[in-house]
Image (cartoon, rainbow, N blue to C red):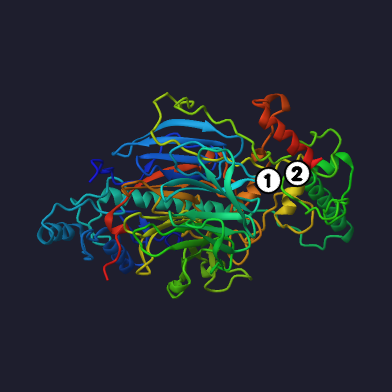
Amino acid sequence: MGKKKRTQVFVLKPWCWYCEREFEDEKVLLQHQKSKHFKCQLCPRKLNTAGGLMVHSQQVHKSEPEPLTNTLPGRDGYDIEIFGMEGVPTNALAEWKARKEQEAGVAALAAAAQGKRPRHAYTVIPEADLMAALEQHKALMAMRKNPQLAGSGAMFPPNGVPPFLPPGVRPGFPGMPPPTLPPGAVPPFPGAPPPNFRPPFPPPGGAMPPFPAQNGLPPATMAARGPPPAFVAPHAGQAPAQALGSSGGPVTAEVMPPRDGVFWPDNDACPAEKRALEPRYRYTSPGPEDTSEDTATTGQKRKAAADFL
Amino acid sequence: MMGSAFRPVQKDIELVQPPSDSVSKISFSPVQDILAVGSWDNNVRLYNINNTGQSEPKAMYSHEGPVLDLAWTKAQQVAAHDAPIKCVEYVETNGTPVLITAGWDKKMKYWDLRSPQPIGQVDLSERAYAMDATDKICVVGTADRQIHIYDLANPFTKYRQVESPLKWQTRVISCFPASVGGDGYAVGSIEGRVGIQYAHQADEKKNFSFKCHRVDIPASQIAPPAQSGSQNVFPINSITFHKTQGTFCTGGGDGSLTFWDGMARTKLKAFSAKELGNGDPDNRPNPIWGTPIVSASFNHTNEILAYAMSYDWSKGHGGVPPASANATKIMLHPVKPDEVNRKKK
């Protein structure tokens, strides 16, 4: 009796020695071996066994056969003749059987354990509890979306448009300082660097900081541009997100869930734009004292800053 | 022939010391085997690659914000926009070197490499998302799915503006190299589709588009919005042309690479994410999505294809891989002739 039960739980399926894959059927296994392991790499021909493939390579292509394809490491040799389950080395077979038996045993144990799990209560949850949970969740989400509001107590209208925009100003021009500042926030240094802003390039002519060792420069140097990222409003992307066309709602770098299988269903903003809203990619502007390299730039910088105020 | 026959071992080779944050763009120098890598960690790194595929970090320099694009030139130049610059191209037209930049401030600017002021600028209809240029044309894709084509012989007036053939946001644009003949470009969208477009109206009949970088949803997992035959659809992140054959390679958000022959409209070779050792979308019941391929570049002899795997934000901040996963990698793929050679007619 016990023996019969054991066979019901544990049936050894045919498997492929080359890649240790299991198959429902010996026929499928043979097909698999032909197409995965005994396929000639020089022509479309598929052979039945490793030996067959070797003879084929030598006679048809006059070349030493390449090692077998798609195999586990060390099993790509031609010395063992395997056809389906025939010819599999006995020690490998025994090992496999032991492993499968052990897995089956573990699975059986797990299944038994599952049977003993306490049952859930399927009673109706009282409405009051549900409402309380909903309120809690709402509060949590609000905190998460607008952390600065949670601190200052200031409230924007629910659609998130700043209340006193002068008419004619496009809401959310990138780099626009936020209309209200929460107490304790950084003073609004405008995000967009002014037109003539120069990021500190290494001095031309080969003094690049080496990494890891100074090796001299390639003859072609490069004008790669990091964007002077404009999205620096101290608010969590208040203005920029508006510019991205995310209509209303408290603004964060929210991402739409996949729709119809499309992983990025948001036609109005590209992933990089959303990414640039993340705090860690935001450009932290150097203080005014750091930027006084030459008068022309500073002058323009001041002017640009004044534009925003 | 160049003396540097790229003879690596069978497998693709990983670049040493990759950037710590996602890669935005990689590009080989047009004259040497030097690979430039721009990254979201604000740095640009240069790697020297020898003919056995060994790589060696050469130099690194920092910007104050994430690097979104880069291009090889022969001099250094500073250009500025009011919003992040999304695209940079360097062209030489009639012997004059010109740097073209386009940004999220809805402007495209032309720069002389010697002066800090732009030569000129043109307004785009929306934020620039993708751009590529040859010595003849410059093609910019914007956020409203328009494609603006500029003839560089007359760069300040728009040559043509067409709506993208693809119904979804433009992700990448890549112009045909001179070897293809005809001014054309390939445009890839966030919705697993690539369109081959010709710049001139006369060639419009040759335009076509095709689907790629999609993974079927197995019948057992179809949940209500999905029907049988539904697919997971990934953005096309990069299109790279082989400079002499004119075939191209697409890299997608599913972490796979595919080589195509646009003229013969055939697929030449596909490297699934699994073959690249990058996840396993066919795993059942839970597919393991690979790290997206964000950028790819052929070297100047077209013997190496470098491709960068890193997170492209297409699944939002929820999809950021844990730091321990070391998802950012740059791989060097030895290009075999049958992967890139055009199909005989």
Q: Is residue B241 above or below residue B161?
A: above
Residue A26 visible in rendering = yes
Rendered image quadrant of residue B322: top right
Tell me: residue A289, above or below residue B332: above
* A119 sits left or right of B120 in the view: right
| Amino acid marked by disc 1 | Leu
Q: Could you tell me residue A258's position as x and y percent?
A: 62, 61
Q: Amino acid at mark 2?
A: Ala
| Badge 2 element | loop
Q: Give the quadrant of the C terminus of chain B.
A: bottom left
Residue at label 2?
A: A236
> Can you identify the residue that label 1 sits on?
A277
- Near mark 2 (Cα within 10 A), the count class, few <14, some 14-19 or many ≥20, is many
Crowd rating for badge 1 (residues with CA inside 10 Å; few <14, some 14–19, many 20+): many
Residue in front for this viewpoint, A68 or B324: B324
Front residue of A281 and A290: A290
Instruction: State the residue at coordinates (76%, 45%).
Output: A176
Indicate the position of residue A6 as horizontal and vertical percent values.
44, 59
Residue A38 lies, with reference to residue B56, above or below; the image says below
| Tag 1 subunit | A
Q: Residue furthest bottom?
A: B205
Question: Residue A117 placed where, x, y %?
Answer: 66, 53
Tell me the CA gap for discs 1 and 2: 8 Å
Question: Do the numbered discs 1 and 2 sit on residues whose CB atoms are within 8 Å?
Answer: yes
Residue A292 placed where, x, y %? Answer: 68, 25
Q: Are marks 1 and 2 on the same chain?
A: yes
